[in-house]
Amino acid sequence: MHEPDELPPATVKTPGSVDRATSVRMLRSSLRGLLVLSLVGLLVAPMIADANVLKTLTEFLTVLVLAWMWNLLVGYANIVTIGQHAFVGVGGYAFYGFSAAAGWHPAASLAMAAGVSLLIAVPVLSIVFRLRDTYLAVGTWVTAEVLMLFAGKLPGFGGGAGVSLPTHVAQAFGSGMLERYRNIYLITLATALVALVGMVVLLRSLAGLGLAAMRDNEEAADACGVNTKRLRALCFLCVAPFLGLMGALVALQKLSISPTSSFSITDWTVFIVFVVVIGGIGSLEGPIVGALVYFVLREAFATQGTWHLICLGGIAIIVLLWDANGLWGAMRRWLGGDLIPLTHTPERGAPTDPVLSLTTTICK
Amino acid sequence: MASPLLDLQDLRVFHGRFQALHGVDMQVNSGEVVALIGANGAGKTSLLRALMGKVDRCDGVVMWQGTALGAMPATERVQRGLALVPEGRRLFPSLTVAENLGIGLTLGRQRSGPSAETAARFGLDDVLDIFPALRPLLEREACRLSGGQQQMVAIGRALLMRPTLLMCDEMSLGLAPRVIEELYAVLPGIQARGVSLLIVEQDLTRALAVADRFYCLLEGRVTLSGRPENTARATIERHYFGLPSGEVDLPHA
Amino acid sequence: MSIVNQLLQGVMVGGLYALLAYGLSLSVGIVRLINLAHGDFIVMAAFLCSALATGLGIHPIWTVLLTIPLCFAGGYLLQRGLLGRVRGKGTLAPLLMTFAISIIAQNLLLEAFGADARRAPAGDLEVTSLSLGQDVHVGVLPMLTLAVAVAMALGLDRLLYHSALGARLRAVSDDPDAADLIGMATARTCAMAMGLVGATVAVAATFFSMFSSFDPTTGPSSMLIAFEVVVLGGLGSVWGALLGAIVIGLAQSVGGQIDVAWQSLAGHLVFLSIFLIRPQGLFPRA
């Protein structure tokens, strides 16, 4: 499902093709400019936008981060998972546990939510990674089911019906509703930026090269000396804390936890899968495109929950039939490359890769 | 002169952006045995896959019994009398010998087109007469056969498809010399029953021994063609290896 | 209830689970497709069965005469029109496609039938039970389900291993590229396989609809059970599926004795434990 990152340059220069090459370059530059503008807009939003807009933007960023994480696992590390809602739920429950039950400071509880998710990811890794491909997918789903059932049986967490977050936890993030939305928005935005930067650094490093090789052909990558097991483990363990943190933030916004809503497969896996499939697996821009499509459709079908799902599902199927690389896959072919460059060019002289020392121990 | 059974004109085959065949011209006449020889990577298997319609892109003309095959699917080509014994045998490992042969029989029953009436009718008994060694092995799973036995089943499976043209891709690959001899020994009998043969081989000697005509393929191009009896062995070897004229004489087998 | 009754109940629930799993076993074994929408297809067929039974006023068991050909056609067309187009393009695209189909199916059912649970009216069959000795009673419906499960295992085994169609199905499963190369009609064969899956789904759905109540969202949990049965039994093995189903049925029965709420969890845990010890399943095919 992978296309080369850059198309070879046109070798024949006819007047028509020169115009096309220039216009493509202009389009790329303008799209890049649009990305930067959006980033600026996101940064200033808390100062000018009202609570509703902030709420929608927070939801958009949540979907985006979850989509990026799933994309990293499936599109790069070849870990096909449909159970990531497990970690979102774990994060939510851990947040409640530390902030409400144990009385820790809510900010620290957010961090602990990420930590607990990481902790749970370790045994999940060892169990589920005995499976391959589609069996791995179902295995992650079974694990999510089991974790959800366990959460419903945990004493002190409200059982099957769940429990609300005590008000002091919510108020620690702001005394007024607007202030709370602002702070939650900023934390979500910060998480999204960290995720983006982290992914770019990872994918541009040697580890990222290994991942790209794995994505193309795992056996060949293994034969070339890429430590596929460790790379996959690395990706999985990097993704889990982000999922947990998002779960905690969701719990904070919903002001409650419950097995069905915190571990909701629809909200945290189904929609995310559709977003990435439609937008495009295996690129950083794809999930952005997919998330935009998701929200545009949601506003259009505001009152019809089931039809929103049916519509997204139908589009996903059409996209799968037409171009396995999604909308961005098609756009990128047309644009001749990614907006956020991830290609690897051989270094002249000594490599100055900052992640090199870490990754040389990871890739054997 | 009668029009050829198989006529390839300027055949160009691409795997993605890589061009495997650069304008190949080739004919197989009815009742002939044609050998296509060449070293590894010459493009021999690409040619056979193109004949079955199983390549990414195929330009040029493939005429079969006077009709251009174009983009005809493999199932239809088999119905019209093309049968392939794939490289590496490619039997179905969990199926028994009888079941593997049965697949060929089912395909043979779907024979249609102009040559359906005249094509030789091979039945299970015919195949067992040609390969008596298979008789006690009918209920054995294909994955538990030796290479030579597998090759026999693969040829038998193709014969049961009632082919007008039988294409064998590297029959001798990985087999002991004695086994190869036994296999090649049955080919004249098959030819005698009216089946034309296109033998793709790395093994020069065997292929030239049974062939009426041969083509030499090097890096996707036909560098030499003719009759084995009219062409010097040294010339053939030179073209097989792509050596310029006047090189050292190679030892003969 | 006595222990023997509980165990027998577990075995017969295993019969139902086997019926649910056969279709998945076929699609995994032959077409190499893990159909995430499998459970939803069973639920769809269950709704169809229930609607026909109430609409035509017949016993649900007789609806199979209508649902089998309908579901066969459905499976055939699904493979031919949709799933077959992404066959051989890696494992991700088919998985995602069945995932999308599953979601669409669930929501279409929600739109069409609402969220209420329902159950096909089985009449006397539901309540009749036989006495096999002191304190041992078995319901006729569960017994019939188990009998049908065994019969179906026999039938599928016969079809797969003693017929020309079966040989073709197994050939395409062994080496789809070779099958393509020598000119077999692999697309049509795979479609036949999915049609066969549809037929088994129709039979499974009939008993499923009578056994317990179902609603549009019951699909995934049924699919999960079917998946566990298939993996436990060993890929491609119909008899393995029957045995695996009985094991899970017994596990659930025993777990339910300890605590009703632990019933499904017990099944999952037993599956996970056996899987960790013997990942290839009970009767893996060579």
Image (cartoon, coloured by chain):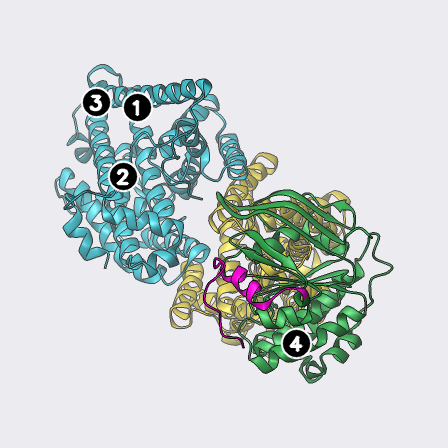
Q: Relative to B241, say whether B70 is above or below.
A: above
Q: Earlier in the sequence, mark 1 or mark 2?
A: 1
* x and y percentages locating residue A178 in the rendered image: 22, 21
Q: From mark 4 to mark 2, how far is it between C-alphas?
A: 67 Å
Question: Mark 1 sits on what residue?
Answer: A32
Q: Relative to C207, say whether C70 is above or below.
A: above
Question: Mark 3 sits on what residue?
Answer: A43
Closer to us: mark 3 or mark 2?
3
Q: Which chain is yellow?
A: C
Closer to us: mark 3 or mark 1?
1
Is-magenta flag for residue A224? no
Which chain is mark 3 on? A
Q: From mark 3 to mark 2, how far is it between C-alphas?
A: 19 Å
Dots 3 and 2 on the same chain: yes
Dots 3 and 1 on the same chain: yes
Q: Nearer the viewer, residue A143 or C47?
A: A143
Q: Amino acid at mark 4?
A: Leu
Q: Is residue C248 left or right of residue C277?
A: right
Q: Nearer the viewer, residue A313 or C133?
A: A313
Q: Nearer the viewer, residue C14 or C155?
A: C155
Question: Mark 2 sits on what residue?
Answer: A246
Closer to us: mark 4 or mark 3?
4
Q: Is residue B248 visible?
A: yes
Q: Which chain is cyan?
A: A
Of all residues, the one furthest to the right in this rendering is B117
* x and y percentages locating residue A82 in the rendered image: 41, 48
Q: Amino acid at mark 1?
A: Arg
Magenta part of the protein: which range? B230-253
Taking the spot 28% from the left edge, 50% from the top edge, the residue there is A235
Dots 1 and 4 on the same chain: no
Q: From mark 4 to mark 3, how far is it between C-alphas?
A: 76 Å
